[in-house]
Structure formats: structure tokens, C-alpha cells
Amino acid sequence: MSAPAKTFFGYPRWFGTLFVVDMWERFSFYGLLAILYLYLVAAPAEGGLGMGAQDAAALLGIYMALVFMASLPGGWVSDRILGPRRATLWGGAAIACGHTVLAVPWDLSLYPGLGLVVVGTGLVKPSMAAMVGRMFEGRPERREAAFSVFYVSIQVSALFAPLVTGYAAERIDWHLGFGLAAVGMAVGLVHYVVGLRGLGDVGARPGDPLPPGRGRAVAGRVLLWGGAPLAVLAALTATGVLSARHVLMLVGVGVLVVPVVYCTRLIRGRREGGERVRLGAFVWMLVASAVFWMLFAQGPALLNLFALESVDRSVGGFEVPASWFQSAQPLFLLLLAPLFAALWIRMGARVGPAAKFAVGLLFGGAAFALMARAALGAESAPVSPWWLLAVYLLLVVGELAVAPVGLSLASQVAPRGLDGQVLGAFWLFAATGAALGGQFARLSSVVGETFYYLGLGAAGLVVALALAMARRGLETRLSAGSAAAAPVESAN
């Protein structure tokens, strides 16, 4: 009798390899995210760039948007050229190089460093998710549970990364914090290379490879439609014709236009009727998710600034670094993710993704209604940190009802061989939400923080109500033409 195969908490060993790699990749990402905004607004005398609060929020929103948006071409490259396994390797290497560039104490290293991180993350995100999604093909409840467990790898990193990079950046040197993020990604790459043999055939080949001879034609189009516009923008910026703010505005417009164009082409492609219906319903789910990500984008920006300026951070004579509050969200996620994974299995098909999204938006809206109350109190004196912690707790409940469920739904509705591209669409709408969140942050200086947060809360609650009212039709369309022809959600 052969010995039982070793597993990683009940999953295949290759799942454990991906878990650890993603954990370190997320360490580098969240380590950077925790300190980037604070670095942008810090005075030059303190080693920062001295950028205005609203401009810094807009830049951070565009950066987050591009990180998400890069999953679109990254998913295509994974599906058609590299395959998920090699895309993850090359993407991780680009991320490590980007953080290394940011660690160089030179103001001009900011944009090249962020650019490399964006490119690398665009390859890694859809590739990792595609490998996990195919593992549970045809078992949506188990797939949602697996994505929730996989989400833990993100939160372990997001918990410790701000503590490590935040202390180094705020108390020693900003570029040391960036350097520690580079070390984290390097560790993840080493682990991935060591564990490659255990992956077997998972992600070894592209799901929909390019026909022979098409590579040169694709490269030419990329240079024409991508490289040429970038070169023109770079030249106009270098000569002073365009300012950095103008470039960011152009990028922001692109982030809003690309989802419409992409989803139109995706739905009108040569797909079966059932596939069109499922993808069309999925787009409406993505629009709702974009509103949640708009709320989420406030955390590393304005909520980070609120922690710095308006929260009493003194604990026993020690002033807690503002960036440490970025660890609250992942801590709550680690505590709640197993409960949500068990909850989705227990509920089964009785509660579908549209209903779960509605709950997520409801909690997201409630978080910013509470934030408005905290901002009102902060007008007279620094407020207790419990206000901000409660806001993060509500956001976490919303995130657990949107992010892993949305990733699982993308795998469910994706036509075979297009997993990476549909998963890329999920992150594309997350990009739209992040960009809108960064641009809307400018309103906080016009209407005041209290009314700004009230507006965000109202947006979340309105979309939650719309989803709740439309959920039955959405659930039916999301299941159209699938093996399980019945609606995803039974009557509630």
C-alpha cells in the first residue's frame, strides 16, 4: 500500500508552492503600497517628494489602476505566449527589478520603478489565478473556498509588510523601505524556482497558443499601438510640453475607455450564445465591483493621511507609524477569511454571486458612512484609532464578499482557453475603480472630508440596493448555457 501523497492543508503540493510565492509577491506589493503615498507627500527635507495631498492621491490611484489594468495584456501573454508558469516567473523578476530601482535614492527613479512593478504584476496576477481556477473546474463552491484560502497568502504579506517597510521608511529612510520590498520579491522568486518540479503540468503551456508565425505580427502591433504613443508622451513630457499631471489625466481617461472597448470586443467575439449571455451579465457584476474598488482605493491614500494627521497614535509613549494602520485590513482578513470560506460552502448554490456582491457593497458603503463621523470628530481634536480600525473592519467584510467571489466567478464564466483574459477583465474594472477613487479624492479639498466620505458611503449603498433588486436576473444569465443550466441562486 503506497504512502498517501503529501498535501498543503488538503490541497496538492503545487498549490502550496503558489501560495508561498504569492505571499512573497504580495509582501513586496503591500510593502510598497503602505509607504508610497506617505513618501509622495513627505517634505523634501524629510526625504520625500513634497507632493500635494490630492495630487499624490491621484497618482496613487493611477498607479493602482495600472497595476490592475496590466492584468489585461498580462493575461493575454499568459494565455497565448508564455503560459501561466513562465508568465509568473518573468513577472516576478520584473517586480524585483522595479523595487530595486525604487530603492535608489534618486527622485527620477520613481516612474521607471513603478513601471516595472506594473508590468510584472500584470503577468503574475492573472497567471496565478488561472492556475488555481483550473484546479476546481466544475466545482464552483470548492473553487470559491480555494480562492478564499489562497487569499490568505495575500493577507499574511499585507499584514507584515507595512510593519517592516513602514518602520524602515518612516523612521530610517524611505528608500530602505523600498529596498526591503525588493528583498521580499527575490525570496519569492527563489522559492518558485525551487518548487517548479512539483508543479507537474499545471500552467506549463498556454491555454490558447498563437499559431506559428503570428509572433512577429503581434510584436509589430504592440510597437505601433503601444510603444509609439508611449514614446510620444515621454518626448512631450521631457520637453515640457506636457506636465506629469497632464500625462496622469490622459492615463486616467484611458483607464475609463479601455474597459468599454475590451468588454464589447469580448462579448461580440465568436462565442456561443450562452457564452455571450454569461459574459454580458459578468460585465454588470464588474461595474458593481468597480464601485467597491473605488472605495477600497481610499485606504492607502486619504485614510493613510487621516491616520498620519488626525488619529491619536500614541501608545505608552510610542508613536505608532501611520503606515502600520495598513496592517489592520489584512489582520481582519486573516481572521475572517476561513469563516467566509466555510460560509460559502455551507450556503452552496442558495446564495449566488450577485447577492454576495450586494452584501459587499453594503458593508463598503457603511464603512464610509462611519468614516464621515470620524472625520467630523477629527475637526476639533485627534480621534481614537478605534474609529479607523472599525472602518477597516467593515471594508474587510465587503472585500471578502467581492474579491474572492469575483475571481471565482471569472473562472466560471470564462470560455475555455480564455481564463487569463477574463480574469484580466476582473482586474481591469478594479483599475477603473482605483483610478476613479484617486481622481475623486480631489473633491475632499472642495467639499470637505466629512461630506466627501458621506458621498462615498451613499455610492456604495445605492449600488448594493441595485444589485439586490437585480440579483435574480443576473444569476440566471450568469448560468446560461453552462453544464448546470439552473440559476446559480435559488429563491431566497
Image (tube, helix red, strand yellow):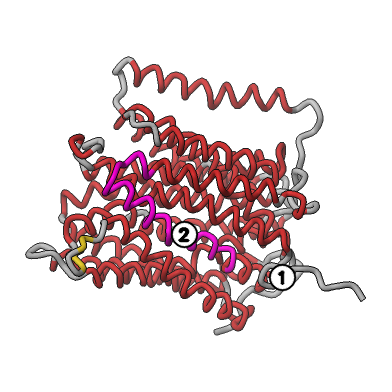
Quadrant of the drawing holding the N terminus? bottom right
Let me know if residue 267 appears in the view: no
User: How would you rate the neighbour count of disc 2 (Cα within 10 Å): few for under 14, some for 14-19, many for 20 or more?
Assistant: many
User: Residue 139 has which mark?
Assistant: 1
Q: Residue furthest right?
A: 1
Left or right: 379 with respect to 185? left
- Which amino acid type corresponds to the residue marked 2 in the rendered image? Ser
Question: Mark 1: which secondary structure?
Answer: loop
Quadrant of the drawing holding the C terminus? bottom right
- Which amino acid type corresponds to the residue marked 1 in the rendered image? Arg
Residue nearest the viewer, comparing 264 with 464: 464
Let me know if residue 468 appears in the view: yes
Q: Is residue 7 above or below residue 182?
A: below
Q: Is residue 305 above or below residue 82?
A: below
Left or right: 249 with respect to 47? right
Residue nearest the viewer, comparing 428 with 44: 44
Quick check: marks 1 and 2 in contact, CB under 8 Å?
no
Q: Look at the image and give the residue range highlighted in magenta.
A: 149-177
Q: Position of residue 151 (x, y in %)?
A: 54, 63
Q: Residue at x 77, y 50 (%)?
A: 197
Q: What residue would you read off at disc 2? A: 289
Q: Is residue 139 above or below residue 64?
A: below
Q: Residue at x 80, y 33 (%)?
A: 211
Q: Is residue 88 above or below residue 335?
A: above
Residue nearest the viewer, comparing 107 with 344: 107
